[in-house]
Amino acid sequence: MNVAKTGFLMMVMTGLFMIFGYAVGGEQGMVLALVIAVVSNGFMYWFSDSLVLRAYNAQEITRTQMPDVYEMVERLAKRAELPMPKVYLIPSPAPNAFATGRNPSHAAVALTQGLYDMLSPAEVEGVLAHEMAHVKHRDILTATIVGTLAGAIGVLASIARWGAILGGGRDDDEGGGIVGLIVMSIVMPLIAMVIQMAISRSREFHADQTGGELTGHPEYLARALEKISVGNQVRPMHNAQPATAHLFISNPLSGKRIANLFSTHPAMEDRVKRLLDQASSMRR
């Protein structure tokens, strides 16, 4: 299923680049955009995870540096029957975490310093179990490409907007002209938002459930989510980008009302309730 999603997203990106090229340079611009899109899609497949990790200044950690976190991930990987992913620490006081990579053999799990400091060891393990669930379900490539795609769309929208301001674009009979550029500068960010929302919110519920199964204590993750929700209000992630917000276990833009309106995450209260219900069922 996620392979199909990834292919669809790459086709969407190719189409958007071609539309942009046509609006700016007519048929020749469209052909050039197609070539750029093909190269970009290949680059995204191989390097999109590195781009996301670099965007948040994530630093790889070893067993020697953070033995407790490393051993948690190692233990969870064995339980999930997955290869050991790379582990990264993000130097941010905001409590959050995400997983990325093109497949389980090339996966990475990242957590913030704020999450490590705020949560108990059991709660940290609950969060890491959630991220390992994303790896197990092969959500990570689709989610990472969506982030890169949304960022690319934002750049194209900015170029289109400035092109319109500076009088760029082809004549209307050869391309979209100035009007086309203006329309694209408005429509493209909306398309990016729709694509992010198209990544089903049930993906988070599914990862929560599997994470609870991996630790055997869903209540640990439930408590962690409650603390993370409050922590994000007190210590927001100032360098968080809308294009990658869906990667995190909790929306890092949760302090912004517009971001909440179009959030890719389910309501935290619903996630906590489901986890507590799961914990009760496991204790019966």
Image (cartoon, grey):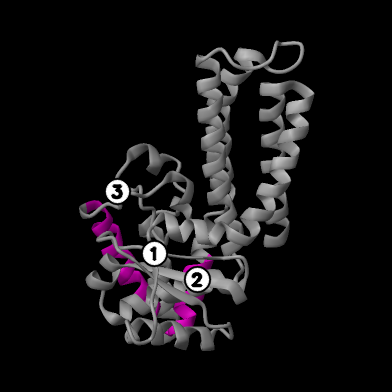
Q: Bounds of the magenta span?
A: 206-233
According to the picture, the residue beneath numbered tag 1 turns out to be 58
Residue type at numbered disc 2: Ala
Q: Is residue 225 magenta?
A: yes
According to the picture, the residue beneath numbered tag 3 turns out to be 238
| Left or right of 191 on screen, residue 231 | left
Tell which of 79 and 218 is nearer to you. 79
Callout 3 crowding tier (Cα within 10 Å): few <14, some 14–19, many ≥20: few
Measured as percent of width and height from the top left, residue 163 is found at 55, 20
Q: Quadrant of the C terminus?
A: bottom left
- Counting every numbered tag in the picture gives 3
Is there any visible trace of residue 9 in the rendered image? no
Q: Is residue 43 magenta?
A: no
Residue type at numbered disc 1: Ala
According to the picture, the residue beneath numbered tag 2 turns out to be 108
Dot 1 or dot 3: first in sequence order is 1
Q: Which is in the foreground here, disc 1 or disc 3?
A: 1
Residue at coordinates 28% horizontally, 68% vertically from top-left?
113
| Left or right of 37 on screen, residue 55 | left
